[in-house]
Structure formats: structure tokens, C-alpha cells
Amino acid sequence: MESDTLSAHSRSFPDPAPPPVAAAVSPVLVVDLDGTLLASDMLHETFWSAVGRDWTTPVRAGLALLRGKAALKRVLAASAAVDVTLLPYDPGVIAEIAAWRDGGGRVVLVTASDQALAEAIAAHLGLFDETHGSDGAQNLKGPVKAAFLNARFGAGCYAYMGDSAADLEVWRHAARAITVNAPADLRRRAEALGVETAHLVTRPRTPGPYLRALRPHQWLKNLLVFMPMLAAHDLSAGTVAASLLAFLGFSLIASSVYVVNDLIDLDADRAHPRKRRRPFASGAVPIARGGALGLGLIAAGALAALALGPTFAAVMLGYLVATFAYSFVLKRRAIIDICVLAGLYTIRIIAGGAATGIELSVWLLAFSMFFFLSLAAVKRQAELIDTLRRGQEIARGRGYRVEDLPLVGAMSVAAGYVSVLVMALYVNAAEVVELYPHPAALWGICAVLLYWLSRTALITHRGEMHDDPVIFAARDRVSRICGLVILGFALVASGRLV
């Protein structure tokens, strides 16, 4: 028995002369698809793609599952619209296949995924002499796959490349077992089978991609839950503690939505020059774990929400429903998607008020409504400019065409300027005198906001805006300076700097 550990793009088989394995074992290399050739799983790929197209998919999938897993895969494959040219193929595995073919061996793709998907992938890659998948009645996995391979090629007459415990039964009958990114326990179990074994490692196992899947940088938006506390000048211990718990709950719930949204948007993200690096789209995090991750985050966020009382929990439920409605349907509806995005910002402020029991000012709600409508329009404008640069006419997964750019840009500028007008009217309101010893300093905030919004519109028009204007502001030096100047004016107005 032989055991090797190999790195990405290295030769799996240590024999010094080509062909590396064909001479010692067999001219047939059988390659699994999910988790092996592909850093993903087509069952989950098709499920989330189908859900993104029709939110009733889980019901139809459940009914299909009653007829067996192969039937489920057939139904999902027919309902989904997966672009096989964008899937996260493993370059290390492809390099091994190419080396085998260069040595004169034959390569066969045998997968539990549906036959139609397997054939589409094989046609795209052009690497396989044969392609076999599940046929809607028989699930080609584990013992069934082993029996199929033994009948077709003969026991001990093929090498098999796989990644999961289900492949142990196949490796038992193979001439050589090749594991791909397998955990240590699975490697040991494969070696214990008594067949020649090699291990291919192409991706590191680190928690980093899982953390990135939560998008912690997006938690900046959840700082809005502190706005009611700050606007009311209430910094008591109870209020601060309630706001901190609200921030935690909102961050957990928001991350669950980001996870689900990324799963639904896999194709669109993979076609995007920057979003294709997201953990699920790139294959850094298995999408099979995405659903469990999302549910866990929702459960943790719900506990935090319930601790703050029924009003806050109701607001959080409303946010969750609105975000899922946006992810599944509304983000593909022009204009309403921008309005919903703006509302999702504002609901964070409402949540802050619900958590602390502070009554929200009409001025604060009016300002936030127009200000965040402007930022939502900027987000869509940036996406449309990216679409135009890629030579496309329709924004993928959105309800806009490139000719809508002037209108969307005008919306962002108009809404932003109206928010500054609301702020200016607030400065002259009677209640301002009661809250601020030096209310005239608030005019400085109006001036800085007017400058920042105008500069943001110019940067977006030039195509230099990040996908999310909030993240852009956090990373942009000028925006950070503007934030500090606004804070300074607020402190002066409150009498804390004079």
C-alpha cells in the first residue's frame, strides 16, 4: 500500500516516468464530480438556482424526493438554470486529468449528479471519454456506483478519484484510490482498504472563508441601531446595553440573509468581476453547508431579538421577511428594489428605537428615507456601469437595462439632495434648541453631506464606485475625513467641544 500527500497542480503519482499510473495500474481513470472535479455540489447548486427562480421549489423538491434521490436530482436539474461555464472547477484535479490523458490513459466522469448536468459539464471541459450520471431512477452513488464500475470496467481495473465517505465502497474495488481534499479521517479509512492510495490536496482547510461568508464588513450598516440613542442624547447604561444587543442580533440575522442571498445569486456572482471571489461562488465554502449556516445564524439572532422584547422581535421578523422577499423576488423588480433597499437601512433605525424604547423623530425617519434611497440608487448605478463595461445590455439578476443609467443616476442625486434639505429644515425646527446649545453648528453637517453626496455621485458616474457605497465610504480616505468633520460639528452643536 502506498500513501502520498500532494499539493495543487502537482503530480498525484510519484512514478518518475510517464504515464504516471497507467503502466502500474490501469489506463482508466474514473473521476467523481461533486467535491472532486468541482469545488461544489450540483444537487445544492440546482436547488438554490431553482429556488432563486421559483420560491415554491422546496415544495416540489420534497414531493420529488418521495420518489427517490435520483428523481429529486432530475426535477431540480430541469428547474434550475446553472451556467456550467462558470462553475468552480478544481484546477489541480484538471491538471491530474490532463497528465493522465497525456500518458495515454482514458478518463471517465461518473457522478451521482443528473446525467444531463454531467453531459453539459463534460462537453464544456472536453476532458472525458465517457460520461455517466444518475438517470432519474437510479442514484449513481456509493455501492451502486461501485457495481456500475465493476460491471463496466472490471473490479481492480480502474483508478478512482473521489472526496467523500460515500466513495469508500468504490475505492474498495478500485486498483487505486485517489482522495481529493479529504479530511484526515477519510484518508486513513481509504488507506485501510488495502489498495494503493494517493492524496491530492488543492485547497487549504481554514475558517477564513466561512468568516468572509458572514460579510462582517457589512455589519457597519447595523451601527444605525445606535442612531435613536445618539439622536436622543441618551447614553445611560441600560440604553447602551440594549443598543449593543440589538447590534448583535441584527448582525447575526443580516449575515444569515447574506448567506442565503449568495446561494441564490451564485451564477450572477460568478459572472461578476469582483463578486466571483465570494466564498460560495468561488467554492471556498461548500454550498452544501450554506443552508445550515444560514439557519444557525437565524436561530442565534432570534435569541438576541427575543431578549429585547416582543416589539424588537417583531421588527426583526419584519426585516427578515423583507430581506428574503428581496432576495427571492423583489431584487429583480426595477425601482421597487431600490425602495426596499432604502427601507432595509431605515428599519435598522426603527429597530434601535424598539430596542431602547426611544420614540423616533419624524425628522430622523424622513432624513434616513431619502439618504438611503440615494445610496441604494448609487448601488444600482454602479452595477449598471459594470454591466455596460462588460458589453452587456441587461444587468444579470436585476430588472435594469444599461439605458436606465441616466435615470438611476438622477434618482441618486435627487434623493441625496432632498435628504440634505430635510436636515436643513431640521436645523430650524423648534425642538433643536432644546437638544443643542449651539444648533447653528449643524449647518456644517449639511455642508459636508452636500459635498460628500456630490462627490459620491461623481465617483459613481466615473465607474469608480464599490458595489456597496457604505463599504466604499468605510475604505475611502476622504469619506472618513468627512465623517470625522460631521462628528466634530455634532460635538460642537451639543456643547461638548466648546
Image (cartoon, grey):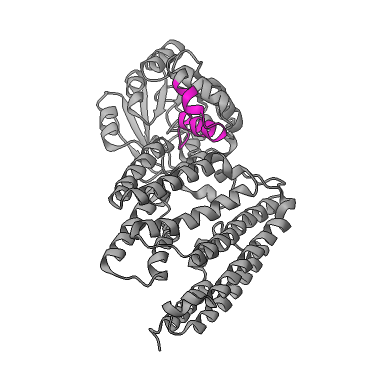
Prevailing secondary structure of the magenta residues? helix
- Figure disc tally: 0
Q: In terms of depth relative to the viewer, which is nearer, 239 or 385?
A: 239
| Residue range (magenta) | 38-62
Is 173 drawn above or below residue 321 in the view shown? above
Q: Residue furthest top?
A: 151
Q: Residue 310: horizontal and vertical position, in percent?
A: 33, 48
Q: Residue 61: horizontal and vertical position, in percent?
A: 47, 23
The question of residue 56 being in magenta is answered with yes
Q: Residue 403: horizontal and vertical position, in percent?
A: 75, 52
Q: In terms of depth relative to the viewer, which is nearer, 1 or 395?
A: 395
Q: Taking 467 as reference, is 158 left or right? A: left
Is 392 drawn above or below residue 199 in the view shown? below
The image quarter containing residue 2 is top left
Q: Residue at x 36, y 58 (%)?
A: 247
Q: In terms of depth relative to the viewer, which is nearer, 131 or 24?
A: 131
The image quarter containing residue 450 is bottom right
Q: Taking 469 as reference, is 28 left or right? A: left
Quarter of the picture containing the N terminus is top left
Report if residue 112 is visible in the image.
no
Q: Residue furthest bottom?
A: 498
Q: In terms of depth relative to the viewer, which is nearer, 270 or 460?
A: 460
Quarter of the picture containing the C terminus is bottom left
Q: Residue 124: horizontal and vertical position, in percent?
A: 60, 32
The question of residue 359 being in magenta is answered with no
Report if residue 93 is visible in the image.
yes
Q: Residue furthest right?
A: 403
